[in-house]
Amino acid sequence: REHPLILMGDFNLFPDSPILAPIYERLTSVAKALGKENEKTFSSYDPKITIDYIFLSKELKALDYEVVNSPVSDHFPIRANITFRQ
């Protein structure tokens, strides 16, 4: 990989899923880095689990992270402000 990387989306996997392990080895979870890994994203009608993620490569840094309480889908949207590390 030559460039900074942002990987995000609905992974339909719990945070401790072994399938996510290779991603956690190479990228940083924005929610975890900012101490917000317990915020739930699914379902927007009765949020009990996290299955939506934003991951960053080491060149990037999250300034904030939010699970948006808006039932526009069956998942709550997530958002983050991201910058380059100095």
Image: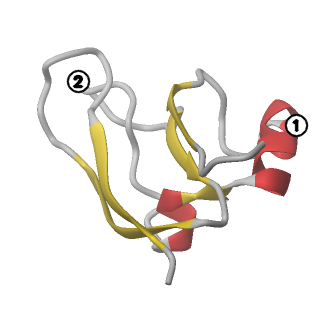
- x, y percentage for residue 71? 14, 24
Q: What residue type is labelled 1?
A: Pro
The residue at 55%/71% (across/down) is 33
* Three-letter amino acid code of the residue under disc 2: Tyr
Q: Is residue 16 left or right of residue 7?
A: right
Q: Residue furthest top?
A: 73
Residue 34 shows in this picture: yes
Label 2 residue SS = loop
Between 37 and 62, the one lying in front of the other is: 62
At x 64%, y 47%, the residue is: 3
The residue pinned by badge 1 equals 18
Q: Is mark 1 on a helix, strand or loop?
A: helix
The local crowd at label 1, few if under 14, some if 14 to 19, many if 20 or more residues have their Cα within 10 Å, is few
The mark closer to the camera, 2 or 1, is 1
Q: Which residue ends up furthest to the front in the rendered image?
A: 2
Which residue in the rendered view is the most extreme toward the bottom? 86
Q: Is residue 37 visible?
A: no
The residue singled out by tag 2 in the image is 45
The total number of labels drawn is: 2
Give percent across and percent down for residue 15: 67, 44
Q: Quadrant of the N terminus?
A: top right
Query: Are there few (<14), some (14-19), or many (20+) residues within 10 Å of tag 2?
Result: few
Q: Where in the figure is residue 58, as x and y percent of width and height? A: 66, 66
Residue 74 occupies quadrant: top left
Question: Of callouts 2 and 1, which one flags the residue occurring earlier in the amino acid sequence?
Answer: 1
Asked if 7 appears above or below 83 in the picture, the reply is: above
Q: Residue drawn at (48%, 59%), measured in percent from left and top? A: 31
